[in-house]
Amino acid sequence: MLKSSSKLITLLFIVILLAIASVNISMQSPAGLLTTPDSLSYLDIARNIDQGNGALASNRTLQATALGDNAYIEQRLWPKLYPIVLSVFIERNYGTSAVRSLSALLLTFTALLVFFIVRRFSSNVLAFLTAVLFMHTLPINTVYAFVWSETLFIPLFLLFSYAAFRYGELQINQAHLIAAYSWLAIFCLSLLGLAYTRYIGIGMVLVLLPLLLISVKTAKSIAACLLAGLILSIGIGAMLYGNYQISGSISGGVRQV
């Protein structure tokens, strides 16, 4: 009975957070999300994905022709996960009204993760109030008002941090190993998501994976962490190698200052 009531309360909080996020985004950007040069690149790639041209950028140089030859080029300065997600919400005319839905969903996911993290140390009500307050802080309001990859990076960062914490908490008890390994898998996927959203996400491997290895106490846990490290190395290495093959740089090319 208590578990059922707790689930209903959590579901109610999720619905309320979604409503708050939707209203917040709509009030901030009534005509659509704001853009910067990076935003236009994301929208361009997302539009090409939506039209079936692949995760490519439009070629706006003099090398492009009216016949469509060389109309699209590889772009590796930004990872492609955010444009792929963005393509589901893209508009044909590069408008950003529909993208507000994505921003509202990601803001809700972010607030929900804050709720779950805080709830580990406090009550449902305090965790909910903290999540609502977090949604209305100036940095978060600013980020989610723009078509920026940070809108995806922030919830992925919270998810991978929470997954690492849960794995470290559960792997100590042999009875919870399956749950622990599930959280380790979520940790790997979210960390790969961070790297494929923004290159700075690669640095998270250097920070948190050693901490996981330090925290484990059994041979199985050490083996699981080493396997996770191998999977992450392959996933991230494949992206960096692809960057080097296309642009001659693992970072995807030279950025204009």
Image (spheres, rainbow, N blue to C red):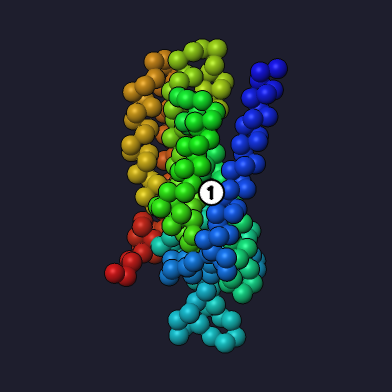
Does residue 184 show up? Answer: no
In the image, residue 81 above or below residue 171: below
Nearer to me, 122 or 58: 122
Q: Which quadrant of the structure image shows residue 250?
A: bottom left
Q: Which quadrant of the structure image shows residue 84?
A: bottom right
- SS at mark 1 in the image: helix
Residue 40 screen position, x and y as percent: 49, 69
Residue 42 screen position, x and y as percent: 50, 64
Query: Residue, x 52% and y 74% (percent of image)?
Result: 58
In the image, residue 219 above or below residue 19: above
Quadrant where the N terminus lies? top right
Looking at numbered disc 1 in the image, what kind of residue is underneath it? Answer: Leu
Nearer to me, 127 or 185: 127
Residue 35 screen position, x and y as percent: 47, 68
- Residue at the spot of label 1: 107
Q: Which quadrant of the structure image shows residue 96?
A: bottom right
Query: Residue, x 55% and y 57% (percent of image)?
Result: 25
The residue sitting at the bottom extreme is 66
Residue 36 screen position, x and y as percent: 43, 68
Query: Residue, x 63% and y 63% (percent of image)?
Result: 98
Quadrant where the C terminus lies? bottom left
Query: Residue, x 34% and y 60% (percent of image)?
Result: 249
The residue sitting at the left extreme is 257
Does residue 38 show up? Answer: yes
* Disc 1 crowd, CA 10 A, few/some/many (<14, 14-19, 20+): many
In the image, residue 69 above or below residue 241: below
How many numbered markers are drawn? 1
